[in-house]
Amino acid sequence: MGDRQGPGEADRDQGRPTGTMGDRQGPGEADRDQGRPTGTMGGRQGPWETDRDQGRPTGTMGGRQGSWEADRDQGRPTGTMGDRQGPWETDRDQGGRQGPGEADRDHGRPTGIMGGRQGPGEADRDHGRPTGTMGDRQGPGEADRDHGRPTGTRGGRQGPWETDRDHGRPTGTRGGRQGPGEADRDHGRPTGTMGGRQGPGEADRDHGRPTGTMGGRQGPGEADRDHGRPTGTMGDRQGPGEADRDQGRPTGTMGGRQGSWEADRDQGRPTGTMGDRQGPWETDRDQGRPTGTMGDRQGPGEADRDHGRPTGTRGGRQGPWEADRDHGRPTGTRGGRQGPWETDRDQGWPTGTMGGRQGPG
């Protein structure tokens, strides 16, 4: 306001300070990724918000770090009790020290430690260090979400219930066979077997072996979430409704074309095509190929979530509403300027400009 920075918005990733009141930083918003401190009360850092990715400490009480919030990605320790790391929150990516209850979601430092061992209950979500240890063995109940070390072991075997989410070691074994009920979420070994065939109801989430079979064909309803073998087939064609989440083989085909609704979430092959063009609605979430094209241009509404190619273009310009979530190319342009409403989530170029100034909201 008056050449100052408005009090309400947040540079979500790289975190330029967003709220300023009397030239101070506002108390309510969070620099989500790189996390410059957002809330300041009497020149201190507020106790409520979280630096989501690079995680500068956000809550300070008497000069200490608050005990409730989590540095979501790079994970500087967020909860400190007597200068120790609090037991409740999770460092989402790089994971400061180990708390006893939570899971390092991406790069998976072990989170639960009991007597110097790894706790028995949690899962390293991405790179999957084993989380449950009982008698120095791997616990029977959890799943290494991404790179999938086997999680359940009984008598040296793999437990029958859980799933290796990414690289998909088989999780259910009955009589040395694969159990009928679970899904290898990432690299997708078939999980349901009926009479030696693949069951009709489950989905290989990442590398996506086909899960539903009807009359020897692929069922019409499920989605290979990551590497995405086609899941829905109607008349031996690919169904129009599902999304290959990571590696993104095209999922919806209409008349031999690619459907217009779904998004290749990670590697982002284009999913929506209208007249052999790319559809205007969906986003390539990770590698961010442009998804919406109107007249061979990029559509005006969506955001390349991770690597952030610009998504909205009007007359060859960038649209005014969406945000490049990770690497943060500026998304809103009006008359060659940056739009006033959205935030570059990761690298955090200022998004709201009014007359060349930074917007107030």
Image: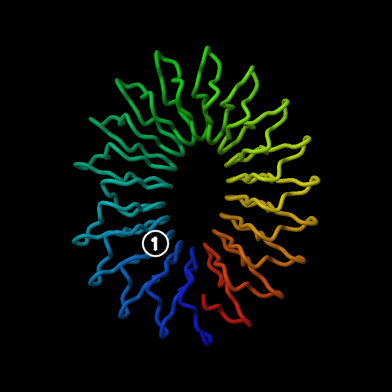
Closer to us: 48 or 327: 48
What number of labels is visible?
1
For the point 59% across and 36% down, the residue is 227
**Residue 122 point in image, percent of width and height:** 33, 40
Name the residue: 22% across, 58% down.
Answer: 84
Residue carrying label 1: 55
Q: Image quarter for residue 271?
A: top right
Instruction: Give above or below for 100 relative to 293.
Output: above
Measured as percent of width and height from the top left, residue 250 is found at 68, 39
Residue 229 spot, x, y in % from top left: 62, 32
**Can you say whether 160 is above or below 245 in the image?**
above
Q: Amino acid at mark 1?
A: Gly
Quadrant of the rendered structure where residue 71 is? bottom left
Q: Is residue 11 left or right of residue 105?
A: right
Tell me: 180 left or right of 210: left
Name the residue at 80% across, 56% down: 295
Identify whether 114 is placed above or below 313: above
SS assignment at label 1: loop
